[in-house]
Image (spheres, helix red, strand yellow):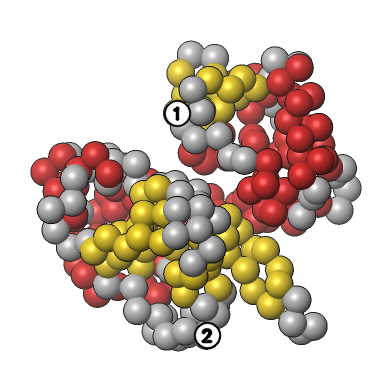
Amino acid sequence: MIKIGSLKSLWVLKGLSDSEIEDVGRNLAPVSLEKGAYLFYRNDQSSGIYFLSRGSLQITIDNDENKEIIVYVIMQGDIVGEMSLFSHSERSATVVALEKCLLYKISPDKFLELMMLYPTIGVNLSRILIERLNEANAIIERLGTMDGPGRVSNFIKSLALRTGDFDEEFYRIRRKPTHRIISQRLGLSEKTVYRAMHDLLDNQTIEVRDGSLYVKKSFVEKRD
């Protein structure tokens, strides 16, 4: 039986009681991936939805020149493959593990049943998809005029608002993203990301404690 503690980090289950989470857990199948292993490839037949309990995943597509383009990095607690809820078409992207990962898989039909039973799940999923869309729009709008450090700052702000737990004057991102993940997500060199993060540390805008990243509320909520 899946331990309830490993499911509480899943954003889509936020707000459910322990008994409700246990009920959802009975319908999930654990999936383990080693670093570099592929969860699925673009054009694979859709067969399920996955919740990421531990680790990080990279979503990629190939352009017309057959070059790999990094689209998104899925962090702990997020969902992947959710488009199979709305369409039985082939997978639109390839997903690979950036590190050792633990996921939970559920069939689209069963997930729809659980959303009917527990409407909070549907509300959480809507929020996740809207936040992704808003984040993508913001990135598209700002990338043309924003330099490397500015793009890193914007990424940290977005991540804090989307996944951070607010506590007094800080947003706590429970698992600090690595420089590699940020560089892959933003298309920047790791050296640029390192310098930008170092500047944020020097300015006391962020702090690192016990593997978590703390981001000042005044920085996150500041309007550019």
- The amino acid beneath tag 2 is Asn
Apparent side of residue 169 relative to residue 193 in the rendered image (left or right): left
| Residue that appears at 76% across and 17% down | 202
| Residue that appears at 76% across and 55% down | 187
Q: Position of residue 81 (x, y in %)?
A: 43, 68
Residue for badge 1: 165
Q: Is residue 77 above or below residue 46?
A: above
For the residue carrying disc 1, how many other residues have a C-alpha within 10 Å: few (<14), some (14-19), or many (20+)?
Answer: some
Residue closer to the observer: 137 or 72: 72
Q: Position of residue 31 (x, y in %)?
A: 32, 63
Residue for badge 2: 43
Query: Considering the image in quadrants, where does the C terminus appear?
Result: top right
Real-space Cα separation, disc 2 to disc 1, in angstroms: 36 Å
Residue closer to the observer: 164 or 221: 164
Disc on res. 195: none
Under circle 2, the secondary element is loop
Q: Examine the rendering and report whether any part of residue 125 can be seen.
A: no
- The amino acid beneath tag 1 is Asp
Apparent side of residue 51 relative to residue 212 in the rendered image (left or right): left
| Residue that appears at 67% across and 53% down | 185
| Residue that appears at 45% across and 28% down | 165
Q: Position of residue 205 (x, y in %)?
A: 69, 20
